[in-house]
Amino acid sequence: MTSFNLSSLLRSELQEIKPYDTQKYPNVIRLDANENPFAFPKDILEKIKAQVHEHFFNRYPDPLASELVNMLADYTKVPSTGIMVGNGADEVILNLLLTFASGGRVIITPPTFSMYKIHSLIAGATPVEIPRHPDFTVNVSAINEAAAHFDTRLILLCSPNNPTGNAIPPASIRSILEKSAALVVVDEAYIEFGGESCITLLNDYPNLVILRTFSKAFGLAGLRIGYLLSNPAVVQQLLRIKQPYNLNAFSQLAARVVLYHQAEFLAVVKKIIQGRKILSAELSNLPGVEVFPSVANFILFRTPFPATRLHRDLLEEGILIRDVSRQGLEKCLRVTVGKEEENEIFLTRLKLVLTRRGKCVRSKGGGS
Ligand SMILES: *Cc1c(COP(=O)(O)O)cnc(C)c1O
């Protein structure tokens, strides 16, 4: 017998984190993860393939991804010294927290992206939750009050916000930047779909950090590419702790080719925005359904029924969306804007399950 006890080696705050997994449903319409629903363009895929050569495999990639960073400088008009890429925006968030927030406090504004809290705990930081108002706008005065605590290192804001779909007005972000001695991170994962970017504030505020990703508008969720825009001093600090080869050679190449063809992807973004308008309008027409305004590629809505049940009903009809009711959004679900035909099938099946639940409630006199 040894005294070995594995779970006693784990920091207590990590015990509450559940391993991330997504259920595999082979034959469903997937509108649950805010991915780009369109297949990657074949001609662009061919261009990527044509540039894959033997040395992609045996040699380490460029640790700074300089070619990609230079193209991002062109795309964002932010100097390349203020740009860093990562293995998805997720890794950039973790690196920010590890570098600046370990042992300190991090302000987050629920309901928002669930990874902020998890990454804060992993980094040994204390998440401080400042809930949004009932209309999902951020509580600027409460954030500023919490930010005044000497140990606040980072304020994590998401605009447009996942899962609510609304953006934070730049004036609110400016007010937070003005008063904060902490870094203010604005996650713009969905900025190509709407909302106003904070890029123009970078020159005025050395404490501003902007996060971006290729996973949503640019259709590269599978290749894990995210990046950060900030004042160069922030990048300098982050580079100390970044894993040397965090972005693999293939992903660097694919991101470059996609940026070269950005017009094509931004045209698809327009199509998705159009789809969002139609889907929002049609959802609003369903009796009992409340739709929240969205400037992202997904829509949050509330029905009269428990979200967990509706989620399961839809799954049985071959539609996978996201149940967000456990994030303080009672009876709410989030649907990603898909292709036109996917949106139509989703609406038809949603009508079906809502009608069925409605009848069920009436015949049983409530509940179900
Ligand atoms: C999807 C998403 C990300 C993750 O982006 P990756 O680059 O795929 O890691 C970051 N922030 C928000 C708010 C997201 O919804």
Image (cartoon, helix red, strand yellow):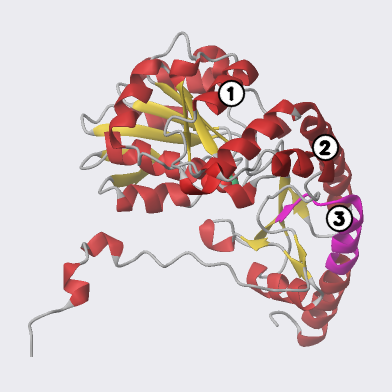
* Secondary structure under the numbered disc 1 in the rendered image: helix
According to the image, label 3 marks what residue? 343
Classify residue 363 as left or right of residue 23: right
> Residue visible at 25% across and 49% down?
124
Would you place residue 307 above or below residue 299 in this image?
Answer: below
Q: In what element is the residue under mark 2?
A: helix
Q: Relative to 362, is 235 on the left or the right?
A: left
Direction front: furthest residue:
54
Q: Quadrant of the C terminus?
A: bottom right
Q: Amino acid at mark 3?
A: Asn
**At 83% from the left edge and 41% from the top edge, which residue is drawn?**
43
Residue 217 got which mark?
none
Residue 240, position in %: x, y?
A: 28, 31
- Choose mark 3 or mark 2, whichever is in front: 2
Q: Nearer the viewer, mark 3 or mark 1?
A: 1
Tag 1 residue: 72
Q: In terms of image quadrants, where is residue 360?
A: bottom right
Comparing marks 2 and 1, which lies closer to the viewer?
1
The image position of residue 91, as x and y in percent, is 44, 44
N-terminal label among 3 and 1: 1
Residue 61 point in image, percent of width and height: 47, 38
CB within 8 Å, label 3 to label 1 = no
State yes or no: Cβ of the residue under disc 2 lies below 8 Å from any atom of ligand 1.
Answer: no
53 sits to left or right of 340: left
- The answer to whether residue 175 is visible is no
Could you tell whether 279 is left or right of 2 in the image? Answer: right
- Type of amino acid under label 2: Val
Q: Which residues are magenta?
A: 335-350
